[in-house]
Image (spheres, helix red, strand yellow):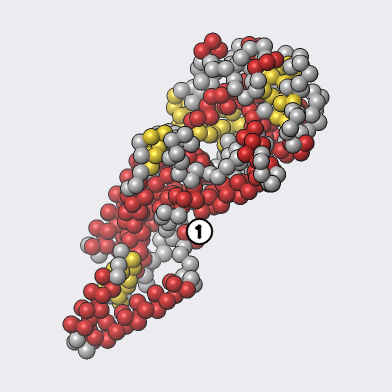
């Protein structure tokens, strides 16, 4: 089955056919590192990690570029009045984003360019736009350069807006603009700004506008035409609209598919600083196991808005525990049998069909949990062949989604002192219980079992002995 993706520009599902067979080039707008990452940043990064993992599972070689915007008005503003240089602030927050991605099991990009490393490429595009009559330098000697929106008839093609209905660009003063919708390509150096945030250019000292950064980095690392451009729904306008216009006007085909992920609400409300309801990444990841947070953030369809509330992580924990319990039970029952090794794991056809249908993760998770139920039923019936098949499929599906509890990245460190101590105590008590049962002291055996259960530990008696796990 050919995968279909919803293309925001076409406003419809399209068969995904890469420009080069077997190769996928993907550019995703990364963070502007002005402050700490929040739940919305994590959700967006996770969506494209899921897409990348599925395309890779389908046998495609994915080149994945996610940028870092490390020069921006907000970065300079947030560094004002402190002893911290703007670039140090940007790097500090960049490290926070990286830590959040790593804790969520998000694969590292093929390359992660910083905007400040592509200044010359941005200036080349700006010069081309001026030469083609699609950009102009401000006549007031400020050093600003603007995109001439009226010169590009296709402006508005991504969001299907007519120029007359568009909001005015607010990324620069309108004092020298020919049209309020014209947006800044280059911002001239202004008094009071740090000299380290200015670069020489044909138009004078200054720095790039926001939109030109991604056009330059995408072209530099993926070429003039590439397969997928991704980002949050909030970036469609003006950021992605302006990227598309300036890139096309400069002669680049740019992205073949535009993919946008939905946003995150908190307790039914849009997350915003003004409401004071922002949930930061570090805060979220401290509330539950990282794999649970990943399950929650990735369980809904990527184009939908998700709502974070007090019960969200508990529901995700319960769902994930059903998968973990089945795998643990299957591994113990199948150990030492001819079904212990099942070879290469392959996802079921229904799961593949769901993922090929615009990355329909909710339906894919439905297949995963149906397989868990079938696997448990097979274990109850001592149908080890069916149980082994279910185990193999569960591993394959959970690995594709990045929530395989047996993956090394999610493994609990058993050498942690607390785990070592707990294991030693539980194993000793299980030994005492076994001795009591052999001596027919069933009251003592039951008492030990009840004490362990009361402490939140589940005991399962199997032909190979007693095994324990957390409730």
Considering only vertical position in the picture, is 241 above or below 48? above
Q: Residues within 10 Å of mark 1 (few under 14, many from 20)?
A: some
Quadrant occupied by the C terminus: bottom left
In-image side of 291 versus 445 (left or right):
right
Could you tell me which residue is drawn at 48 percent across and 46 percent down?
A: 280
Considering only vertical position in the picture, is 460 above or below 83? below
- Image quadrant where residue 331 sits: bottom left
**Residue 344 at what x, y percent from top left?**
45, 56
Front in this rendered view, residue 268 or 332 = 268
**Residue 419 at what x, y percent from top left?**
43, 71
Front in this rendered view, residue 266 or 166 = 266
Could you tell me which residue is drawn at 21 percent across and 78 percent down?
A: 446
User: Is disc 1 placed on a helix, strand or loop?
Assistant: helix
Front in this rendered view, residue 247 or 346 = 247
- Residue 240, visible in the rendered structure: yes
Could you tell me which residue is drawn at 45 percent across and 55 percent down?
A: 286
- Image quadrant where residue 244 sits: top right
Considering only vertical position in the picture, is 264 above or below 389? above
Disc 1: which residue:
409
Farthest-out residue, bottom: 439
- Residue 386, visible in the rendered structure: no
In-image side of 70 versus 308 (left or right):
right
- Image quadrant where residue 297 sits: top left
Front in this rendered view, residue 159 or 337 = 159
**Residue 366 at what x, y percent from top left?**
32, 45
């Amino acid at each position: 089955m050919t995968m279909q993706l919803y293309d925001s520009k076409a406003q419809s599902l399209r068969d995904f056919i890469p420009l080069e067979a077997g190769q996928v080039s993907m550019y995703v707008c990364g963070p502007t590192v002005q402050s700490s990452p929040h739940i919305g940043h994590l959700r967006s990064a996770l969506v494209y990690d899921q897409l990348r993992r599925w395309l890779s599972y389908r046998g495609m070689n994915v080149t994945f570029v996610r940028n870092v915007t490390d020069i921006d008005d907000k970065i300079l503003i947030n560094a004002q009045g402190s002893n911290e240089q703007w670039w140090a602030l940007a790097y500090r927050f960049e490290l926070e984003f990286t830590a959040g991605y790593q804790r969520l099991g998000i694969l590292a990009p093929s390359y992660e360019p910083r905007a400040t490393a592509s200044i010359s490429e941005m200036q080349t595009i700006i010069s081309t736009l001026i030469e083609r009559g699609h950009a102009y330098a401000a006549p007031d000697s400020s050093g600003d350069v603007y995109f001439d929106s009226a010169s590009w008839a296709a402006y508005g093609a991504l969001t299907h807006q007519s120029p007359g209905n568009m909001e005015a660009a607010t990324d620069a003063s309108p004092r020298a603009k020919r049209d309020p919708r014209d947006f800044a390509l280059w911002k001239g150096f202004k008094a009071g700004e740090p000299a380290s945030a200015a670069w020489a250019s044909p138009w004078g000292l200054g720095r790039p506008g926001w939109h030109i950064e991604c056009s330059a980095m995408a072209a530099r690392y993926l070429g003039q035409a590439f397969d997928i451009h991704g980002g949050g729904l909030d970036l469609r306008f003006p950021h992605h609209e302006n990227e598309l216009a300036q890139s096309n006007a400069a002669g680049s085909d740019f992205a073949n598919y535009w993919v946008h992920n939905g946003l995150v609400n908190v307790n039914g409300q849009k997350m915003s600083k003004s409401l004071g309801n922002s949930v930061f990444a570090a805060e979220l990841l401290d509330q539950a196991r990282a794999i649970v947070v990943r399950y929650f953030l990735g369980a809904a369809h990527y184009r939908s808005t998700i709502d974070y509330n007090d019960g969200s992580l508990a529901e995700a924990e319960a769902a994930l525990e059903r998968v973990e319990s089945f795998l643990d039970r299957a591994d113990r029952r199948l150990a030492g049998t001819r079904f212990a090794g099942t070879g290469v794991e392959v996802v079921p056809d229904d799961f593949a069909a769901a993922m090929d249908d615009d990355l329909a993760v909710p339906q894919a998770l439905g297949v995963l949990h149906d397989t868990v139920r079938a696997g448990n039923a097979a274990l109850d019936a001592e149908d080890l062949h069916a149980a082994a098949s279910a185990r193999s499929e569960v591993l394959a599906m959970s690995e594709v989604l990045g929530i395989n509890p047996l993956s090394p990245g999610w493994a609990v460190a058993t050498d942690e002192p607390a785990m070592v101590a707990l294991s030693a105590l539980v194993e000793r008590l299980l030994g005492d219980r076994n001795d009591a049962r052999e001596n027919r002291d069933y009251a003592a055996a039951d008492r030990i079992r009840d004490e362990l259960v009361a402490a939140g530990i589940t005991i399962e008696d199997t032909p190979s002995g007693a095994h324990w796990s957390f409730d």
